[in-house]
Image: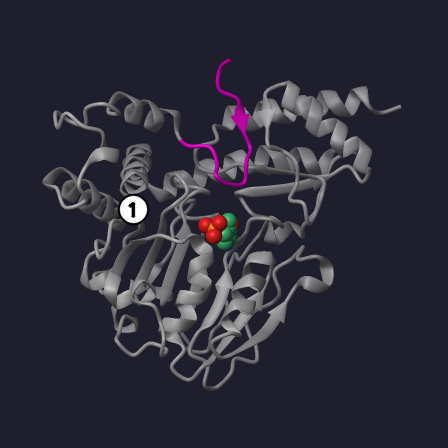
Amino acid sequence: MGRVYNFSAGPAVLPEEVLKEAAEEMLDYKGTGMSVMEMSHRSKAYDTIIKEAEQDLRDLMNIPDNYKVLFLQGGASQQFAAVPMNLMKNKVADYIITGQWAKKAYQEAQKYGKANAIASSEDETFSYIPDCQDLPISEDADYVYICENNTIYGTKFKTLPNTKGKILVSDVSSCFLSEPVDVSKYGIIYGGVQKNIGPAGVVIAIIREDLITDDVLEGTPTMLKYKTQADNDSLYNTPPCYGIYICGKVFKWIKKMGGLEVMKQKNEDKAKVLYDFLDQSNMFKGTVRKEDRSLMNVPFVTGDADLDAKFVAEAKAAGFENLKGHRSVGGMRASIYNAMPKEGVEKLVTFMKKFEEENTK
Ligand SMILES: *Cc1c(COP(=O)(O)O)cnc(C)c1O
């Protein structure tokens, strides 16, 4: 069987070129006679891999010199605790709740201090991004937290909240490297890589240097203290070596494609194919407010659970995998990350049209 069109929300599709290259290097990485999986993380060969990965990411995102790039473990979810442990000096933080991941981060932060939900779109099943230009930011807030692209609900912040001078922390797991960002607007940008960059097991955190200190909450584990990781260039202990190596290859792939401006253009073109179809279909409907639509995750429904299930099953049989919506929303969701070719989305739309014709009386 050949490769399918994989619309999984994560772990998700990776560029075929990258997978082939990794396969070629599997048994003998560049004449070392071993796989990257078998290599000491202190070896010269590995040192080059992780340093190049960092440099390529810095080039892609234009990361200012006063930001550290950390390659960490524990998933994005581990950062739900690490962020308050490292940043809550006043033990106060403001959270904007735009979905399940933001809510989980907010709930975790409550273990460490006073986490305030200063805005939420839960009243309408997280189908929109609240207006965040004049929020009741707490005077002593250590930071303001957002989940920038809501993987489950398919919304994205198109403008960043006005934090009124407070540090902005953003979970970008599902929009990492999908378009250019101005890193200098954030205190911390972090994301698990398994959505848009690489294999599960790596989290990348880009942190402004002045936020990396010894002044962390009492009891913060050594491993969760950003300073431990920063002082050791992400090599305090054994990092997720193979995952970082694949991330590095994906960075080079994006560079070769022309960088994040080009990526954004491609992602907009690709998403438009699907959204345009949804907007004119009599059967399929997008579930979120148009101006807040994500370029990466596109949830849609027919309005009939049986018909949804039929669609997912027939799509699977036709080579379109993982279109079932998140268990908390139902319906369908097409995740169309960087590595999903436009052709995959076009073919999906052709399939949806045919399904609509066949199932309309
Ligand atoms: C998937 C996801 C997470 C959770 O990631 P883990 O690596 O499984 O902990 C958190 N935030 C967002 C936005 C996600 O998409």
- Highlighted magenta segment, given as a residue range: 1-14
* Amino acid type of the residue that numbered disc 1 sits on in the rendered structure: Leu
- 259 shown above or below 76: above
Q: Main secondary structure of the magenta part?
A: loop
Residue 63 higher or lower than 49, as above or below? below
Element under disc 1 = helix
Q: Position of residue 235 (x, y in %)?
A: 21, 53
Q: Is residue 8 magenta?
A: yes
In the current view of this chain or complex, which residue is farthest to the right? 361
Query: Which quadrant of the view contains residue 20?
Result: top left
State the residue at coordinates (66%, 24%): 315
Label 1: how many residues lie within 10 Å, few (<14), some (14-19) or many (20+)? Answer: many
Relative image position of residue 171 (x, y in whole percent): 45, 58
Residue drawn at x 75%, y 34% as measured from the top left: 308
Give 306 or 240, whichever is nearer the viewer.
240
Rendered view: 171 above or below 280: below
Q: Residue at x 34, y 57 (%)?
A: 205
Residue at point 73%, 28% (across, down): 311
- Whether residue 67 is visible, yes or no, is no
Task: Choose top left, top right, bottom left or bottom right for residue 26.
Answer: top left
> Which of the image's four quarters has the C terminus?
top right
Does residue 175 appear anywhere in the picture? yes
Where is mark 1, residue-wise? 60
Q: Relative to residue 174, is residue 26 drawn left or right?
A: left
The count of marks equals 1
